[in-house]
Image (tube, grey):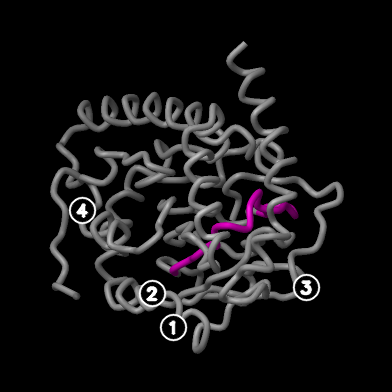
Amino acid sequence: MWSRLVDLTILVGEWLLDRCDRFVARASLIGNDPIFDTRTVVTAAFPWHRTLEAHWPTIRDELDELLEHRDALANFQDISTDQASITDDDRWKTYFLYGFGFRADANCARCPETARLVASVPGMKTAMFSILAPGKHIPAHCGPYKGVVRYHLGVKVPRDREHCRIRIGDRYATWTEGESLLFDDTYEHEVWNDTDDERVVLFLDVIRPLRFPMNVVNAFIVWAIGVSPFVTDAKRRHREWERAFESELASATPPTPLATGRSAPDATESAPRRGATSRSSCGE
């Protein structure tokens, strides 16, 4: 019954959010391009991206410790079940820090500086590492709601980065270590890692700046998403994975270095219609 309720929530939620998108598009203060220009829109509306970029070596250090336990990290679809429509193997891993009001305390404790940095981002709703194995392809899909926008910080990028790319609408982008990419994930997007190296981004969903009164409506919608059965189920699944991960680390010999974090220096057009394309709550 719970599984059916989650599935029903997804279907009803997609129908409602699809109809809200047109109003969000009209009220957007940052336009509706597939990819937002870092030099203009991102710098003006999301100045915090400079802080994340400045501290990316610290974020990378904490990531490298996590990757010592790569095989034990959660497959994306094991936490967020709707991802099963776009991935069914163990080559897309995730490591959640925050998710719509949920704080993964143990995960944040292993990455204290990364957790501190993302917690300081205004309007941050989701924060995680997204880990893409060599040769992994994520097929075309669309995000569910235009009221949040997606941010990637390149943390570990293959040397042959031109062959590790993302298509958003009709535009293509690659990642660079220590640099930001902000885009509207309600456009159809697709990802390829056609290299022999791993790709990892720090992945955030943040509130889209909107005019009044749509900003108030958006705040309510985002809150409702956070208390929906779908997100509640994802939180439950994450807690189950976290207990298993904690148990594995506790039994490891010698003790892993994950118990201690590293210190960082102080730092102060609307979207096209989806058609039959898969929709995903997080995706890439």
**Dot 1 lies on which element?**
helix
- Which of the 4 image quadrants contains residue 191? bottom right
Q: Position of residue 172 (x, y in %)?
A: 69, 75
Q: Main secondary structure of the magenta part?
A: strand
Q: In the structure shown, which secondary structural element does the residue marked by tag 3 occupy?
A: loop
Between the residue at mark 3 and the residue at mark 1, the CA separation in whole angstroms equals 23 Å
Say whether disc 4 or disc 2 marks the residue closer to the N-terminus: 2
In this view, the residue in front, 82 or 73, is: 82
Foreground pick, 146 / 215: 215
Q: Identity of the amino acid at label 3?
A: Asp
Q: Which residue is mark 4?
A: 112
- For the residue marked with disc 2, what is the amino acid? His
How far apart marks 2 and 1 lie (CA) works out to: 8 Å
Q: Which mark is residue 43?
A: 1
Q: Which residue in the protein does label 2 denote?
A: 49
Q: Please give left or right for residue 3 compared with residue 44 in the image.
A: right
User: Closer to the camera: disc 2 or disc 3?
Assistant: 2
Residue identified by numbered label 3: 170
The tag earlier along the polypeptide, 3 or 4, is 4
First in sequence: mark 1 vs mark 4: 1
Q: Secondary structure at mark 2?
A: helix
User: Which of pointers 2 and 1 lies earlier in the amino acid sequence?
Assistant: 1
Marks 3 and 1, the one that precedes in the sequence: 1
